[in-house]
Image: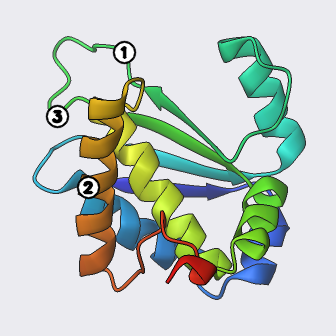
């Protein structure tokens, strides 16, 4: 199950059927894994607060992933929560020459992969995670997010 919660109207103002875009990306990234994912579309201030409280970084960021704690007896166990900041995401999409929908799709895929245990702390992990992201996004018709338009 994918649950999309929208706290910031900017998301629905900017993207037609944003819930469907998020659901499509999360389902594709989850693959055959079981477990629910909650995606919160909110504003920069909310993400900054969460980033400060849970990561000790007092700034907004594009996406945060919170893996679910183990819940004995709950089958399937939820994968966790993803939170996205509208202002940061919109500014990044514009700076990178991407549509906000494509950027959101990439960040949801990225977040779900984090919930599934992927990471990019070292070069080998980063390359593997980016390759998985590229493959998922290609199936969704989204261009390689690591190649900017002027790089092509």
Q: Residues within 10 Å of mark 1 (few under 14, many from 20)?
A: few
Q: Secondary structure at mark 1?
A: loop
Gap in Å between the C-alphas at discs 3 and 1? 13 Å
Gap in Å between the C-alphas at discs 3 and 2? 27 Å
Residue at 74% in and 25% down: 50
Image disc number at residue 69: 1
Residue toward you, 77 or 89: 89
Residue at 78% in and 59% down: 86
Count of marks placed on residues: 3
Image disc number at residue 76: 3
Q: Where in the figure is residue 18, as x and y percent of width and height?
A: 59, 76
Whether pointer 3 and pointer 1 mark residues with C-beta atoms closer than 8 Å, the reply is: no
Residue that numbered label 2 is attached to: 131
Question: Considering only vertical position in the picture, is 61 above or below 9?
Answer: above
Q: Secondary structure at mark 2?
A: helix
Residue toward you, 150 or 106: 150
Q: Residues within 10 Å of mark 3 (few under 14, many from 20)?
A: few
Q: Where in the figure is residue 26, as x and y percent of width and height?
A: 36, 59
Is any atom of residue 78 visible in this view? no
Gap in Å between the C-alphas at discs 2 and 1? 27 Å
Judged left or right of residue 92, residue 70 is left
Q: Where in the figure is residue 141, as x and y percent of width and height?
A: 34, 86
Question: To which quarter of the image does residue 83 belong?
Answer: top right
Residue at 57% in and 66% down: 104
**Which mark lies nearer to you, 3 or 1?**
1
Question: Considering only vertical position in the picture, is 152 above or below 88?
Answer: below
**Which mark lies nearer to you, 2 or 1?**
2
Whether pointer 2 and pointer 1 mark residues with C-beta atoms closer than 8 Å, the reply is: no
In the current view of this chain or complex, which residue is farthest to the front? 151
């Amino acid at each position: 199950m994918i649950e999309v919660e929208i706290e910031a109207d900017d998301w629905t103002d900017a993207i037609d059927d944003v819930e469907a875009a998020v659901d499509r990306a999360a389902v594709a990234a989850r693959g055959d894994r079981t477990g629910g994912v909650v995606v919160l579309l909110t504003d920069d201030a909310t993400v900054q607060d969460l980033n400060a409280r849970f990561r000790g970084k007092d700034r907004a960021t594009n996406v945060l992933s919170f893996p679910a704690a183990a819940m004995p007896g709950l089958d399937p166990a939820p994968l966790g929560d993803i939170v996205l900041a509208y202002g940061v995401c919109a500014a990044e999409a514009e700076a990178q020459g991407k549509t906000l929908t494509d950027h959101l799709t990439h960040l949801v895929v990225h977040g779900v992969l984090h919930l599934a245990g992927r990471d990019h702390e070292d070069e080998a992990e980063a390359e593997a995670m980016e390759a998985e992201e590229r493959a998922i996004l290609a199936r969704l018709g989204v261009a390689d997010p690591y190649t900017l338009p002027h790089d092509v």
